[in-house]
Image (cartoon, rainbow, N blue to C red):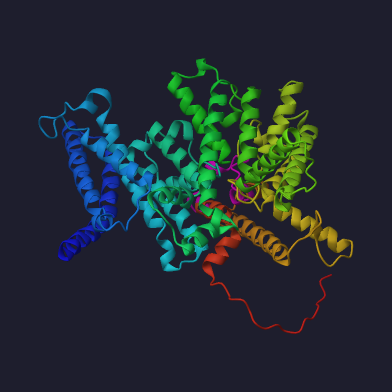
Amino acid sequence: MESFFKILKSLRRLAGFLLPLVSVIGVIILLYDFGFEHTPETAALLVRFYDYFLFVVFMLLLLRVDYAGLIRKKVKYTKTELALFFIFAFLWLGQFPLAGLFSEKSLFHRILDLYIIDVALVVLLFLAELSLGSLNMSRYNLNPALVFLASFVLIILIGTILLLLPNSTYQGIGLTDALFTSTSAVCVTGLIVVDTATYFTPIGQNIILVLIQTGGLGILTFTSFFGIYLRTSSSFQNQLMIGDMLNEDRISDVFKTIVRVIVFTFLVEALFAVFIYFTLDERQFPSHSEMIRFSVFHSVSAFCNAGFSLLSDGLYDVHYRFNYPFLLIISFLVITGGLGFNIIFNFFRYLKHRLIRLSKQLFTRNVVQYKARIIEVHTKLVIITTTFLLVFGFIMNLVLEYHNTLEEHGTFGKLVTAFFASVTPRTAGFNTIDMGALLPATILIYFLLMLIGGSPGSTAGGIKTTTFAVTVMNVISIARGKNRVEVFRRELSIGSLRRAFAVISLSLLAIGLSVFLLHVVQPGLDTTQVIFECISAFSTVGLSLGITADLNTASKWVIILTMFIGRVGTLTLFVALFRKVKTLNYRYPTESIMIS
């Protein structure tokens, strides 16, 4: 019996080694299938390949089951894992008729497209193996910042390869332009060197959409989400690593946070895609399916603060810059995506607490004396700073551009467009006005809004609202002669102040370096336009004064690096590159130096 169990264990190890390899082979064949035109003979061979491929996968899945553990009752499987296995088996076996294997008259051929099932199973297998592999990274004791950095590099390279496929574009695309577009999508920036609407096929546009969604939330969020439901448990070290990357302090809530982020994101994007659909004019679309695709694309792009559009002129298109309900929906999505998931979940916890407290007062008539501190200081700072920036940007845009770029709108239109113009510079990248006609004073306002960006833990970029707020409070505290920074009856830690100073310093250094390099590699560019372009790229905004398409190859590479550094964060980059110093067990004597 023991020898039989040893054989099963060896086969299980072999299956565990072969399944990831087979999943990669399946994805490569899938890319070849989707990315190239095929003759009827090649198409038939691909169909036959899927049949044999899925047969091999099914057998490997059978071998990977721990039969010895099941017999000895030492292995437990989650309901989701078992459901996934049986779904895979049902879909694969359902392809074949009762008489004759690999015949084309199966049940699924009559009710479903067999090709779609094959593709879905290949993708499902790859996601499962990738997710399980990502959860095993903790055993290598890797720096979480380095893993975070590498995940973005990986998805950018994959996106570049996908966009280089012949079926992704109508006329082909160069390596630099493909890399630029992939980086812009993954870093949710929105700067483009080719027209998304006319240059890319629907397949290419869908690839960009997936890159936006993956980059907005992070590929590790997705893989961790799938890995949760494919594994019964996770190591404490694994939870620490993922919590570090997600900025989640409570280790016990790491996986709950991942699930909430994924579910909340898809629910909001789906709901507002429906809202966008009902604001569209069906006369502008060839079919309802195109209206749905347009709605979903812009809902995802807005929530992820990406700024990509399926319109050649962006939202400045004459049919959309006057569609004020549409613009308000996009604004709400941008603001929601830029607040940060921890802020949104904290707000939900507050509402839940208030409802419970109110129900107790109504039904038990007991007055609750204790007021729990639900709203965190971080949440208050984000809400106040965001509101201030929105109101400030709205007023300045309305006053400065009232007789300029807002001239073509009515009174209500001016209000909506000015509000939209205060929302999108904070990392969204959509524009409903002529950017080339902006007044110099308005451009300076845009500089400030773009540099600050959104909030930590969101899909937005920039130095973040909390960094700006902490810096301002620190300046006020120094001016008032205080030796500490206090807010909402709490004292901010010295670590927060040091981090805010480091982020601002490194961000300005990165932007200054990119401006310098652009002038070196392309001297004829206007300085104001260059500064605007570099801040927009670093803060992952996507707005431009019109020079993006005119950049040469070297300039494009500078912007690519700027977008990447801005998305992963300058401080994260330094943490990934330099080994962390352990806590020092000594202190030198303190001495002051002259600052001013």
Instruction: Say whether residue 552 is magenta.
Output: yes
Name the residue: 65% across, 41% down.
348
Image position, residue 78 (x, y; %): 38, 48
Q: Is residue 210 above or below residue 148?
A: above
Looking at the image, the residue that sits furthest to the right is: 480
Name the residue: 37% across, 54% down.
132
Magenta stretch in the rendered image: 534-556
Q: Quadrant of the C terminus?
A: bottom right
Image position, residue 161 (x, y; %): 37, 47
Image position, residue 353 (x, y; %): 69, 42
Q: Is residue 196 above or below residue 152?
A: above
Residue 34 is at least partly visible in this image: no
Q: Quadrant of residue 275?
A: top right
Residue 490 is at least partly visible in this image: yes
Name the side, left or right, on which 413 lies relative to 188: right
* Relative depth, front residue between 350 and 165: 350
Instruction: Say whether residue 91 is magenta.
Output: no
Q: Is residue 401 above or below residue 289?
A: below
Looking at the image, the residue that sits furthest to the top is: 283
Image position, residue 496 (x, y; %): 70, 62
Q: Quadrant of residue 443?
A: top right
